[in-house]
């Protein structure tokens, strides 16, 4: 498999540790984003970890399927895709 290139999401080049919410190919906008981001940051710290970067991307099934095909070589639907951005990341999927 070829090297996986992380898609260019809005804000991907920001160095500041944070939580980002974006949407693609749908009309959904998450409410109370700052409140949710604060809760995520606090939970990570309470568990003894340090926040790097988390992107929540809300998108259509077709958009997600295209990412699966392009970056992971899968031709099926998934709920979550993770892309490690460092050598030893904590990831979920």
Image: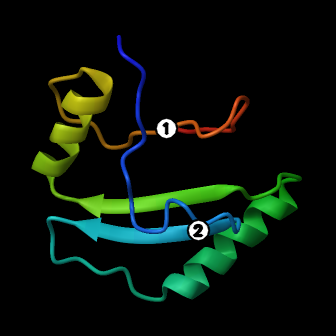
Q: Earlier in the sequence, mark 1 or mark 2?
A: 2
Mark 1 to mark 2 CA distance (whole Å): 15 Å
* Label 2 neighbour load within 10 Å: few <14, some 14-19, many 20+: some
Q: Is residue 27 left or right of residue 16?
A: left
Q: Is residue 14 above or below residue 33?
A: above
Residue with the mark numbered 1: 83
Q: Residue 73: image x %, image y %?
A: 25, 20
Which numbered marker is on residue 29? Answer: none
Q: Where the N terminus falls, by quadrant?
A: top left
Residue with the mark numbered 2: 19
As rendered, which of 55 and 36 lies closer to the eye? 55
Element carrying mark 2 = strand
Element carrying mark 1 = loop
Residue at image location 19% in from the left, 35% down from the top? 77
* Label 1 neighbour load within 10 Å: few <14, some 14-19, many 20+: some
Residue at image location 74% in from the left, 59% down from the top? 51
């Amino acid at each position: 498999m070829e090297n996986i290139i992380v898609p260019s999401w809005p804000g991907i080049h920001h160095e500041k540790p944070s939580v980002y919410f974006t949407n693609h190919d749908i009309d959904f906008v998450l409410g109370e984003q700052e409140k949710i981001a604060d809760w995520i940051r606090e939970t990570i710290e309470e568990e003894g970890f340090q926040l790097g970067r988390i992107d929540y991307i809300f998108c259509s099934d077709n958009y997600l399927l295209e990412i699966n095909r392009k970056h992971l070589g899968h031709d099926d639907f998934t709920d979550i895709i993770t892309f490690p951005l460092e050598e030893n990341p904590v990831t979920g999927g």
